């Protein structure tokens, strides 16, 4: 069973994503900030990360950069989640190596599809 | 008899009008919209030539000597015909050399000799004083005639003490008027636009007045010119008197008078002033060269008819007063008054210009050179020098008029108006050789000019001035007939046995012969100094300045000295530009010798500001290591003060510009910053709105798509949707509040209220909320009442927000919050503290920034789950509301619980006036 790491500082958003991923048949781990997200990855590498950008402490971009900088996680699929609708941020995320970029509020169905297809691609 | 009061009132009214015109002219000049930029005004101002002497005296002279008076006006006409080359050259030289008076002109020509300038000033002072006396006499006599008619005015005044003498008071009033008029500010170019405007106006007044009398005489007293001339022809004695043969001295008298008037027109200080110094545009000369003679023609048109009529009708009355007594004899009211004003205008215009010109000479050529010998004054700032100059000029004005009065009181009665005037003319003519020869002959030498002037003036004094004193009884008149000590060839009116000439031609011949002879003779045997050579060339070639080569400097000076000189006269900015190409290494070495090129550039820069001559002198003073000589300082003084003033204005303007552009830059910066803040705000608002929306949409879709859900989960999800919707609404409310606060549109409803009651009410409102989270809420209020002015709803919102925040950040395990209210001087302070980790000192202001979220990095992240998040707008809004109510809101360390403490301070409400009780919140 594929493992999805959900990183967001909004408890309700984490709750919804957790439910959606579980419903889609994935194992879910969660983190509320960047540091704990990195810790979760070290504890047991997930198969995919849903990563919010504005996190307390180190930001989603920082987390993305560190993961991409580590060869073991260079190919880990990462979908950025953000409440910032600005194009620059989207480009920045993609430039840093994110696989996809989803703007809040998002369509739950589309998000689940994206996660599924990315996981299929990797395997 | 006419009311003296009316006459005086009209006279003072007229002077006040003149003053207004002058003030207006000066104002327009300052605004750069010159009132006198017209050849007509220039021509009219030259008509200051026509003084009271013209106005009253021409008729007097015509009655005595026939048409010979016309020669006094033919001379100037001749001069104006020569204006295109003669006067134009004077104007051009004066402009280039920044000449302030005829004394300055002559001094400048002869190497800026201060002694020559002083000599000219002194001669002018002596020579012109009788002329000023003449004007005082004319005003006094015309006033007496007007007031006393038909009784003959008793004009004997020697027996009266001076304070009963009207002339004395006339002199004083004029002195005050001229001081107000001519020395209001120091104009370095000695241009007085206001004065010129007023003088031009006066020329119109006297012309209109005189023409009125003429028309009245010819067409009212007689039936036209035919009638008048027929009546004269019927009286052979009269007809003969008005014939051409009546000129004193015959043919030589004609020539003498013509030359006298021609030269005096160019050399009288007041004529030089209006003709040359006050000329604003060389091109005005073209029209003035025919308009001014036309003016002379007009004002002389009726002289002979009035003289004839006076002789026919007035019998043996004083011919100098015919202009006034003719209309008076017809029992008219208005016309005599107009004539009096016309005479007054003729007299005042002359006195004003002459006195201003003389006082300028006295201050610049006589007094300042003496003062400059004291080094203290030399070093003082230009502003102080300007003050000195004005002070000296004011004193000079008073003294000149008092001298005029004294001459009038002591000598005046012995002479007719014309006689006095001609004595002054002859004195002014002594300047002509030095001035005119100097303009065309480069060889004219300063020693020759000085000796010629002295000799000519001595001859003038002996042949005209001293005989005048003798005739008025102050000297034994015997020497007039026998000569001094019986030496017949020294008889004043028959020098060297030259008899049968009229006294003026006689005096003019001998004085000019001596003057010109010495000038030419001495010059031929004298060597000029380099400066005088330069000046002579500049004068002689004034119309072709390009013919003059700027000689290269061979002298030695240091860069430092050159730089100091330029700094002093041009200011640091211009100096820096002159030395712009000097490398920094060179600049440091102030003791290094300046290159000829640098010296030449320095001279060019100085010339641009001070004129060639002054620049040459200044450069000369440093290049040769000589101290700046007095005459140079003096001549440069005026221009320097002007240059500094212009520089100062320029610097002021450029600093104003710099300031304006700095302000613009800052405003632009502020706008950019505001724009950036607005963008940031919009981004943050969008971010904050998207967050609850995301949860709402996600759960709504889950509820829609997930089919059967456990009831517990379904309710939980619905609850999230409702809570997040509420959060969204709250957020929108807060954003709107903030927008209103920032745009100043927040409507507050300030009223007198009791903060104690409001605080308790707010505590009740959050009580259950606090209980839910287990927060221990402590209330410490010892006051009975705390009246403040505020909006109860808004203040409650603030207090609840503070309590809410405190609850959120209180210690996790044993959360405690304490609300206290106390009086502090004239304010009440409501403090809400918690026992949380507190806020770092550097973070304390940031919590009031929009969307600022208080970070608590040391807190374990999972512990925050379930903790309500704020929007980050509560504190900024609270602070805005409190500030609107005249209070303050800030963060401190909690004194009792150790966490953060937010303090709201509001001013105590003034005691209730209308017995209205402090309203508690309902």
Image: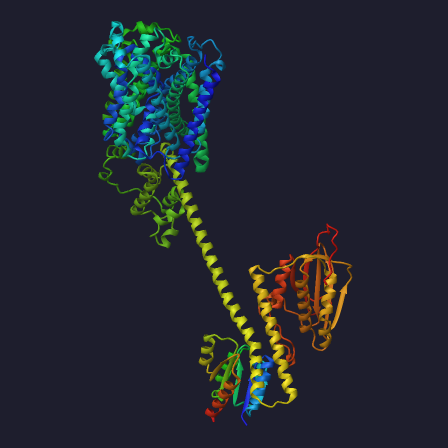
State the image coordinates of residue B485 (x, y, percent, origin top left): 33, 6
Look at the picture and state if B350 lies above or below B889. above
Look at the picture and state if B736 lies above or below B528. below
Is B537 in front, or is B82?
B82
Look at the picture and state if B395 lies above or below B834. above
Q: Quadrant of residue B444?
A: top left
Q: Quadrant of residue A46?
A: bottom right
State the image coordinates of residue B218 (x, y, percent, origin top left): 30, 15
In the rendered image, the quadrant that contains the N terminus of chain A is bottom right
State the image coordinates of residue B5 (x, y, percent, origin top left): 48, 18
Residue B106 at least partly seen? no
Is B883 in front, or is B325?
B325
The answer to whether residue B837 is left or right of residue A80 is: right
Look at the picture and state if B702 lies above or below B207. below
Q: Residue drawn 66% across and 87% down? A: B712
Residue B200 at least partly seen? yes
Q: Residue drawn 36% across and 30% down? A: B196
The answer to whether residue B906 is left or right of residue B596 is: right
State the image coordinates of residue B821 (x, y, percent, origin top left): 73, 62
Q: Quadrant of residue B535?
A: top left
């Amino acid at each position: 069973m594929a493992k999805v790491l959900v990183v967001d500082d909004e408890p309700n958003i984490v709750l919804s994503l957790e439910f959606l991923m579980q419903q889609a048949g994935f194992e879910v781990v969660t983190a509320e900030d960047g540091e704990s997200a990195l810790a979760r990855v070290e504890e047991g590498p997930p198969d995919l990360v849903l990563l919010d950008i504005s996190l307390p402490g180190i930001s989603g971009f920082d987390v993305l950069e560190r993961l991409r900088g580590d060869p073991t996680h260079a190919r880990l699929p990462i979908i950025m989640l953000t409440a910032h609708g600005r194009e620059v941020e989207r480009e920045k995320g993609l430039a840093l190596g994110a696989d996809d970029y989803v703007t809040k509020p998002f369509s739950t169905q589309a998000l689940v599809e994206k996660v599924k297809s990315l996981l299929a691609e990797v395997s | 008899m006419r009311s003296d009061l009316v006459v005086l009132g009209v006279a003072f009214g007229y002077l006040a009008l003149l003053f207004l015109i002058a003030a207006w002219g000066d104002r327009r000049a300052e605004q750069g919209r010159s009132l006198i930029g017209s050849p007509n005004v220039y021509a009219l101002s030259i008509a200051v030539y026509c003084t009271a002497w013209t106005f009253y005296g021409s008729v007097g002279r015509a009655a005595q000597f026939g048409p010979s008076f016309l020669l006094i006006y033919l001379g100037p006409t001749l001069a104006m015909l020569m204006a295109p080359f003669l006067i134009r050259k004077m104007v051009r030289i004066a402009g280039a050399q920044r000449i302030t008076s005829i004394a300055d002109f002559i001094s400048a020509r002869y190497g800026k000799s201060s002694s020559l300038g002083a000599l000219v000033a002194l001669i002018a002072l002596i020579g012109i004083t009788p002329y000023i006396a003449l004007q005082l006499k004319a005003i006094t006599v015309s006033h007496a005639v007007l007031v006393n008619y038909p009784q003959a005015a008793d004009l004997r005044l020697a027996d009266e003490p001076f304070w009963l003498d009207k002339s004395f008071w006339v002199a004083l009033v004029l002195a005050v008027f001229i001081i107000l008029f001519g020395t209001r500010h120091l104009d370095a170019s000695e241009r007085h636009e206001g004065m010129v405007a007023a003088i031009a106006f006066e020329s119109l007044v006297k012309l209109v007045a005189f023409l009125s009398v003429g028309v009245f005489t010819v067409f009212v007293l007689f039936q036209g010119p035919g009638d008048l001339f027929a009546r004269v022809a019927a009286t052979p004695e009269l007809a003969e008197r008005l014939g051409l043969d009546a000129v004193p001295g015959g043919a030589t008298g004609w020539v003498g008078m013509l030359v006298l008037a021609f030269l005096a027109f160019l050399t009288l200080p007041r004529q030089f002033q209006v003709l040359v110094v006050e000329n604003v545009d060389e091109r005005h000369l073209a029209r003035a060269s025919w308009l001014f003679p036309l003016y002379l023609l007009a004002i002389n048109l009726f002289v002979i008819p009035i003289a004839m009529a006076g002789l026919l009708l007035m019998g043996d009355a004083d011919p100098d007063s015919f202009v006034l007594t003719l209309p008076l004899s017809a029992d008219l009211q208005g016309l005599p008054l107009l004539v009096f004003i016309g005479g007054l205008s003729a007299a005042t215009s002359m006195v004003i210009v002459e006195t201003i010109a003389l006082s300028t000479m006295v201050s610049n050529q006589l007094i300042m050179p003496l003062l400059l010998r004291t080094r203290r004054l030399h070093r003082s700032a230009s502003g102080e020098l300007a003050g000195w100059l004005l002070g000296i000029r004011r004193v000079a004005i008073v003294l000149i008029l008092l001298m005029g009065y004294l001459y009038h009181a002591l000598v005046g009665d012995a002479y007719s108006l014309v006689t006095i005037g001609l004595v002054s003319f002859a004195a002014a003519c002594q300047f002509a050789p030095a001035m005119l020869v100097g303009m065309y002959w480069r060889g004219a030498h300063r020693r020759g000019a000085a000796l010629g002037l002295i000799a000519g003036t001595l001859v003038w004094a002996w042949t005209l001035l001293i005989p005048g004193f003798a005739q008025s009884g102050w000297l034994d008149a015997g020497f007039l007939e026998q000569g001094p000590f019986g030496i017949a060839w020294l008889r004043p009116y028959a020098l060297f046995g030259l008899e049968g000439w009229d006294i003026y031609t006689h005096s003019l011949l001998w004085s000019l012969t001596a003057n010109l002879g010495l000038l030419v003779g001495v010059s031929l045997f004298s060597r000029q100094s380099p400066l005088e050579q330069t000046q002579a060339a500049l004068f002689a070639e004034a119309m072709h300045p390009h013919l003059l080569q700027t000689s290269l400097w061979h002298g030695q000076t240091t860069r430092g000295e050159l730089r100091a000189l330029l700094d002093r006269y041009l200011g640091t900015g211009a100096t820096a530009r002159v030395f712009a190409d000097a490398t920094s290494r060179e600049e440091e070495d102030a003791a290094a010798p300046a290159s000829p090129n640098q010296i030449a550039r320095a001279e060019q820069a100085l010339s641009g500001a001070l004129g060639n001559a002054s620049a040459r002198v200044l450069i000369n003073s440093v290049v040769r290591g000589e101290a700046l000589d007095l005459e140079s300082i003096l001549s440069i003084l005026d221009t320097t003060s002007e240059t500094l003033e212009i520089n100062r204005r320029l610097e002021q303007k450029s600093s104003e510009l710099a300031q304006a552009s700095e302000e613009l830059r800052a405003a632009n910066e502020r706008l950019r910053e505001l724009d950036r803040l607005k963008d940031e705000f919009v981004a943050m608002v969008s971010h904050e709105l998207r967050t609850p929306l995301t949860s709402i949409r996600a759960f709504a879709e889950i509820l829609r798509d997930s089919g059967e859900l456990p009831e517990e989960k379904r309710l939980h999800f619905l609850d999230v949707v409702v809570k997040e919707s509420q959060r969204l609404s709250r957020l929108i409310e807060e954003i709107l509040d903030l927008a209103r606060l920032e745009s100043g549109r927040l409507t507050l409803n300030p009223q007198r209220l009791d903060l104690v009651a409001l605080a308790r009410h707010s505590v009740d409102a959050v009580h259950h909320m606090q209980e839910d989270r287990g927060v221990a809420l402590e209330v410490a209020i010892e006051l009975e009442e705390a009246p403040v002015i505020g909006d109860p709803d808004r203040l409650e919102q603030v207090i609840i927000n503070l309590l809410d925040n405190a609850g959120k950040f209180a210690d996790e395990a044993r959360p405690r919050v304490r609300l206290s209210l106390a009086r502090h001087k004239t304010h009440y302070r409501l403090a809400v503290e918690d026992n949380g980790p507190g806020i770092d000192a550097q973070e304390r202001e940031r919590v009031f920034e929009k969307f600022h979220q208080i970070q608590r990095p040391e807190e374990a992240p999972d512990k925050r789950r379930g903790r309500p998040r704020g929007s980050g707008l509560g504190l900024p809004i609270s602070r805005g509301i409190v500030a609107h109510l005249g209070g303050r809101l800030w963060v401190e360390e909690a004194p009792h619980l150790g966490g953060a403490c937010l303090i709201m301070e509001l001013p105590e409400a003034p005691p209730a006036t209308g017995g209205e009780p402090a309203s508690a919140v309902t």
